[in-house]
């Protein structure tokens, strides 16, 4: 009987840990939202130096931030199913620090990958999403 109680207790701890992990994953790494999706297709061009920034031109019907209207874009950038960020990062920070920073500026998405890998070679999918 004692072994059965220990097994039930262990199962309860594992189940609670699993549910807590699922909750934390959604909280810490929110999934890509639904909305109008534009897939960013390879190749991505290098942008600036040192090594972490890339750029891709977006369709003209997706207006980005511009001088005098620096908060116009509401696009989110997703890598596979995770939202990258911070958004509206300075272009020099994207190039220097990377780690998922991005900026939708004019008609271009200037971005870095979550791990500073080359998006042309890492096999991940990049999508610009206009949330609903």
Image (cartoon, rainbow, N blue to C red):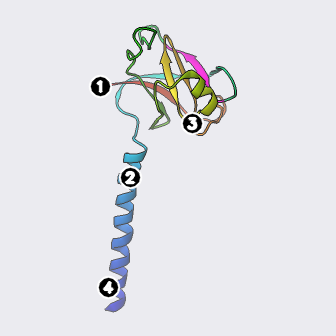
- From the viewer's perspective, is the residue at label 2 or at label 3 nearer? 3
Above or below residue 124? Residue 41 is above
Dot label at residue 106: none
Front residue of 30 and 2? 30
Which residue is drawn at the image coordinates 58% and 30% (left, top)?
112
**Would you name the residue on which mark 1 appears?**
132
Between the C-alphas of marks 2 and 1, the distance is: 24 Å
Task: Choose the circle earlier in sequence order: 4 or 1.
Answer: 4
Is mark 4 in CB contact (under 8 Å) with mark 3? no
Task: Choose the circle earlier in sequence order: 4 or 2.
Answer: 4
Looking at the rendering, in which quadrant would you find the N terminus? bottom left
- From the viewer's perspective, is the residue at label 4 or at label 3 nearer? 3
Q: Residue furthest right?
A: 50
Which residue is drawn at the image coordinates 34% and 65% (left, top)?
16
Task: Choose the circle earlier in sequence order: 2 or 1.
Answer: 2
Q: Residues within 10 Å of mark 4 (few under 14, many from 20)?
A: few
User: Position of 90 compared to 7: left or right?
Assistant: right
User: Position of 25 compared to 52: left or right?
Assistant: left
Between the C-alphas of marks 4 and 2, the distance is: 28 Å
Task: Choose the circle earlier in sequence order: 4 or 3.
Answer: 4
The x and y percentages for residue 104 are 48, 19
Is mark 4 in CB contact (under 8 Å) with mark 2? no
Dot label at residue 99: 3
Stretch in magenta: 52-58
Between the C-alphas of marks 1 and 3, the distance is: 26 Å
Asked if residue 13 shows in the view, the reply is: yes
Task: Choose the circle earlier in sequence order: 2 or 3.
Answer: 2
Is mark 4 in CB contact (under 8 Å) with mark 1? no
Task: Choose the circle earlier in sequence order: 1 or 3.
Answer: 3
**Would you name the residue on which mark 2 appears?**
24
Between the C-alphas of marks 4 and 3, the distance is: 46 Å
**Would you name the residue on which mark 4 appears?**
5
């Amino acid at each position: 009987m004692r072994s059965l109680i220990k097994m039930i207790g262990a199962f309860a701890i594992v189940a609670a840990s699993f549910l807590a992990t699922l909750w934390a994953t959604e909280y810490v790494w929110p999934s890509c939202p639904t909305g109008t999706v534009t897939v960013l297709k390879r190749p991505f061009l290098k942008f600036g130096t040192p090594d972490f920034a890339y750029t891709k031109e977006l369709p003209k019907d997706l207006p980005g931030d511009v001088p005098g209207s620096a908060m116009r874009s509401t696009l989110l950038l997703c890598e596979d199913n995770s939202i990258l960020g911070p958004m509206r990062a300075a272009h020099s920070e994207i190039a220097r620090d990377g780690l998922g920073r991005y900026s939708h500026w004019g008609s271009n998405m200037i971005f870095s990958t979550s791990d500073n890998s080359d998006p042309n070679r890492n096999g991940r999918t990049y999508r610009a999403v206009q949330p609903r």
